[in-house]
């Protein structure tokens, strides 16, 4: 009788142990906010807010060609100005990536170079 009670108590503990849900940590993306403002045809401003220590990359691309890359890790917020006066006229994309995933993207257009006119 004693063994029967002891066996049933052990089986109850084992059954409840298997029935409990194991909690695994869930990996979540940290908060990143960015905005690009085209101040003029030759100047861009990027405003960035993120968690300190979180790594983000900023890229300026023309089609699929990367023209500029910057990695930001330490700062929690940043205001970065980009002089694009040396870029030829055309469309460019500013991307902010985190863990190889694009979290912000904006397409900008730089005006074409003025065409010289001859005076008569």
Image (tube, helix red, strand yellow):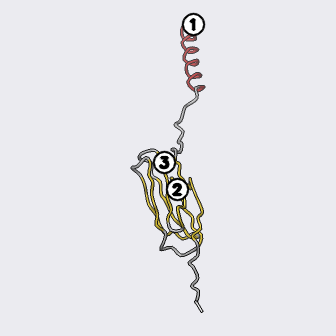
Mark 3 and mark 1: Cα distance apart in space: 68 Å
Above-or-below relation of 32 to 84: above
Q: Nearer the viewer's eye, disc 3 or disc 2?
A: 3
Q: How many residues crowd mark 3 within 10 Å: few (<14), some (14–19), many (20+)?
A: some
Q: Where is residue 79 in the image (x, y as percent from the top left)?
A: 45, 54
Residue under label 1, please give it. 1
On residue 104, the disc is none
Q: Give the residue displayed 57% in from the left and 54% down from the top.
A: 104
- Please report whichever mark, 3 or 1, sits nearer to the chain's N-terminal start: 1
Q: Which of 120 and 61 is in front in this view?
A: 120
For mark 2, what is the residue? 97
Q: Quadrant of the N terminus?
A: top right
Q: What element carries label 2?
A: strand
For label 3, the residue is: 49
Give whichever of 18, 41 is nearer the camera.
Answer: 41
**Residue at 57% across, 67% down:** 92
């Amino acid at each position: 009788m004693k063994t029967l009670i002891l066996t049933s108590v052990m089986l109850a503990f084992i059954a409840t142990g298997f029935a409990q849900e194991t909690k695994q940590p869930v990996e979540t993306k940290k908060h990143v906010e960015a905005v690009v403002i085209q101040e003029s045809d030759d100047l861009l401003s990027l405003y960035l807010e993120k968690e300190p220590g979180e790594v983000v990359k900023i890229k300026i691309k023309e089609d699929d060609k990367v023209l500029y890359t910057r990695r930001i890790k330490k700062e929690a917020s940043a205001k970065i100005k980009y002089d694009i006066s040396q870029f030829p006229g055309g469309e460019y994309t500013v991307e902010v990536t985190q863990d190889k995933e694009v979290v912000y993207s904006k397409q900008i257009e730089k005006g074409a170079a003025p065409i010289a006119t001859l005076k008569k």
